[in-house]
Amino acid sequence: MSAIAARRRTLPGFGLTMGLTLSWLSIIILIPLAGLFLKSFEISPEQFWNILSSRRTLNALRVSFGLAFAAACVNLVMGSIIVWALVRYRFPGRRLFDAIVDVPFALPTAVAGVALTSLFAEKGWLGAPLAALGIKVAFTPVGIFVAMIFIGIPFVVRTVQPVLQDLDPEIEEAAGSLGASRWQTIIRVILPSLAPALLTGLALAFARAVGEYGSVIFIAGNLPNVSEIAPLLIVIRLSEFRYADATAIAVIMLVVSFVTIFAVNRLQRWAQNRIPAR
Amino acid sequence: MTIEVRNLVKKFGSFAALDGVDLKVDNGELLALLGPSGSGKTTLLRIIAGLDWPDSGEVSFNGEDALAQGARERHVGFVFQHYALFRHMTVFENVAFGLRVQPRAVRRDEATIRARVKDLLDLVQLDWLADRYPSQLSGGQRQRIALARALAIEPRILLLDEPFGALDAKVRKELRKWLRSLHHEINVTSIFVTHDQEEALEVANRVVVMDKGRIEQIGSPNEVYESPATAFVHGFIGESIELPVHVADGVVRLGSRPLGLAVDGLASGASRLFVRRHDMQVGPAGSGAFEGAVQHVRNFGPVQRAEVALFGGETIEIDAPRDKELRAGDRIGLEPRRYRIFAGG
Amino acid sequence: MTLQIADTVSLSPSQAKARAHAAAARDNLRTEPRAVRIAIITLAVLFLTVFVVLPLVVVFAQAFSKGILAYLAALSEPEALAAIRLTLLVALISVGLNLVFGLVAAWAIAKFDFRGKTFLITLIDLPFSVSPVISGLVFVLLFGAQGYFGGWLREHDIQILFAVPGIALATTFVTFPFVARALIPLMHEQGTQEEEAAISLGASGLQTFFRVTLPNIKWGVLYGVLLCNARAMGEFGAVSVVSGHIRGETNTMPLLVEILYNEYQFVAAFAIASLLAMLALITLIAKTVLERHLGEGHASRDH
């Protein structure tokens, strides 16, 4: 009998490349993350509870999660409007604005942070007119909200855009020819097709905003209990050598973002099954 | 080069792509693997090439165990269904690839490689395309370049997966003739896979008919057409009329009507009767094994195709010569000139 | 078909008008009234201008607010030069590592079928969903004075935290998925036929990879490297946690921006920031060009 028992693969290198992939993945990602969870098991449940239920931690989590969700909602609405304009209409500078959507992806967060702060500070280009209206943005929770909107835009736009582009024009024509008004077509035909992508974009923008650090801390003011985000609290606890506190907050944030990612994956699988790929 | 395949089994999950296949291919043959999609013909071809591996069974070339070698060592020329030409290389570099990747010890010098590639491009009559990229070629041209590339390594065996599958009807017919004469010229043991019976019967010396991972019949084009070994082959090759009949005590019945056809010791029970469309001889009502009413008639060049509702419920299509015009409503008798009855429902 | 005919046949004015009307009605099925269109476009453009364009403009306005000489002087400070050098070094290390990993991982994942593929891709994506601060924290917990390997490292006098290795590790962590994620879908879509053809023509595994696979994915590789590099040079949170902020030694460009800004050296801070912003803009332009290339690659495959 010949050597077919080994279930050979046609292309070479599977064992080698898979081995390297798994080793490298373990060294860089899995072991460090496992270290974090291992560390969290060293904290007694009471201590864990005390850390999380302390006023400052609770407020930091509230600020991070609450404002991230609010910003993601704004991104959902504005992102949809931007996608619609970019995909459906022709206007001067369309391609430029299309490319600009990615700036928050590409711009280093620290640069975005100082730029937004300077823009919205009391004497800034936008801060001054807003101050005249009695609205203070920089160094308040509103500033955090603004920074989170900034970094979240591309997530909604880039998830929804390809779906709208691939939407079969015939389904709209069909809806129209069956007597639906334009508004009815949008609400009953287009929106349901976009719903999975919209929700995915919302979740991604939320996940990114929750963990965001660089673009937020400059504009935030960082007043404990008011405008202090959870990632900053981790950094502060670290600098005070309170590793248990830092670890506990990090674990909570990680669990929430993993749950979000898991939900996104399920959402996309569900959407794929519902709408077969063309 | 002779190829011998013994008891080959290959499963994808619970689906048996090959379910115990035995096959011997003689030196210099041009063999067609013919079958519907999912019959296992491409899997068999890929296993012979070393691109897939069986779960069990043996493959040998000239008596040597081929499964001990990978695709790289087998020296098999493989022409992919969608050609798999290297997109980023010119036609010339595509054909030269197999010569350039040889181990340094046996690799020929640049001048020899160039001369060889030129010969091959001449052979496929496309030397004027040497500097083009695959995306600039027509389907038929790509097909021939893929063939030249496979021939460059002086393969011991040439395997072609649906060689004309992606081409339009006219180019297909031209390439068929061309492949036959090319095979005659180079005389390498060749196997090609096709789902098109006309292609298999016209090009190959021998045809292997496959279904559901098994070989149904091996024979010359004439044999598989004239004397199909199984019901599947009869139904798959040529245009056949298939009727569910019942055999009991040496009598064949369609419904309750005895047909008066010889049975040749067929066992009793439900059976299937096969007749080629053009083997139904039309006669006056009351004559012949069957009787029916013509539903409608279409004329195709030398024949007229008539839809006939048989007394007994079945509706069949027959091809009759145009010497006697049939008309809708005619009652006619039908006598099969040749027929086969296979046991089983 | 009828439309083509209509173009070639001369129509009477009334016929033409009727047809134009019908065509307009047909378009109406797929678009909104003019006022709505203008409102949506204005809203989109205004939003992007306020939230994206203005921050970008303000960086350069601030950087040059005291003139070009002050700008150049700020960039030629030894501290600035040290930060630029460190940033380039760290980017070189982590992009290099992730390039090799990305190619290896994409080969294993895209060219073969195996159980748990989706799960493996999810694991590779993990760093995208981890807060940058936590990405730094995990290495502090491993290599810090009280970390799992802290004692051993001190005994052997190896410095990881507050030094280049720590910064490179944290940067590699956050940029881990970029190259692999750019290549996996591309290589998956290209299938394995060309590689099979190369193998059956006698090419070795490495020959197949370098002569057939790599030329086909070169734009994808460049794309992944580009995005990976942009993130590597701009990473702030993770690096901030592991760097220790030793001036002139462990400050990358983004960290120096923070320090200078907090010291009210706005021109200097924005001068460094303007370099990073330029990097982002160049990355975006190159990305747009590459996407066109990649798009063409796809198009020429669709026959």
Image (cartoon, coloured by chain):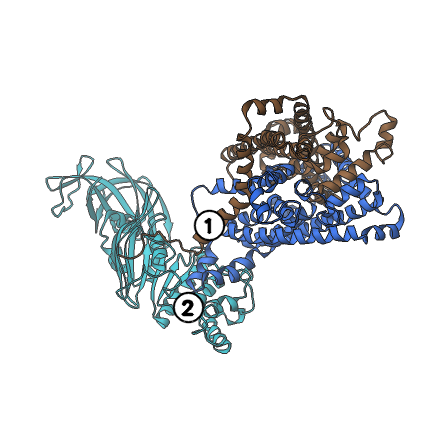
Chain colours: A brown, B cyan, C blue
Q: Nearer the viewer, mark 2 or mark 1?
A: 1
- Marking on residue B118: none
Where is residue B262 shown, x and y percent of the image? Answer: 14, 47
Q: State the CA–CA distance, disc 2 to disc 1.
A: 36 Å
Q: Disc count in the image?
A: 2
Residue B38 as seen in the image, left or right of residue A43: left
- Residue A169 visible in the displayed image: no
Where is residue A250 shown, x and y percent of the image? Answer: 61, 32
Q: Residues within 10 Å of mark 2 (few under 14, many from 20)?
A: many
Q: Chain of mark 2?
A: B
Where is residue A165 shown, x and y percent of the image? Answer: 62, 40
Q: Amino acid at mark 1?
A: Gly
**Helix, strand, or loop for circle 2?**
helix
Residue that carries the numbered disc 2 in the rendered image: B151
Q: Chain of mark 1?
A: A
Q: Between residues C10 and C124, which one lies in front from this camera angle? A: C124
Residue at far bottom of view: B111
Q: Amino acid at mark 2?
A: Leu
Q: Between residues C216 and A56, which one lies in front from this camera angle? A: A56
Residue that carries the numbered disc 1 in the rendered image: A19
Evaluate whether label 2 is on the same chain as label 1.
no
Residue B87 lies, with reference to residue B316, above or below; the image says below
Q: Residues within 10 Å of mark 1 (few under 14, many from 20)?
A: some
- Residue A59 visible in the displayed image: yes
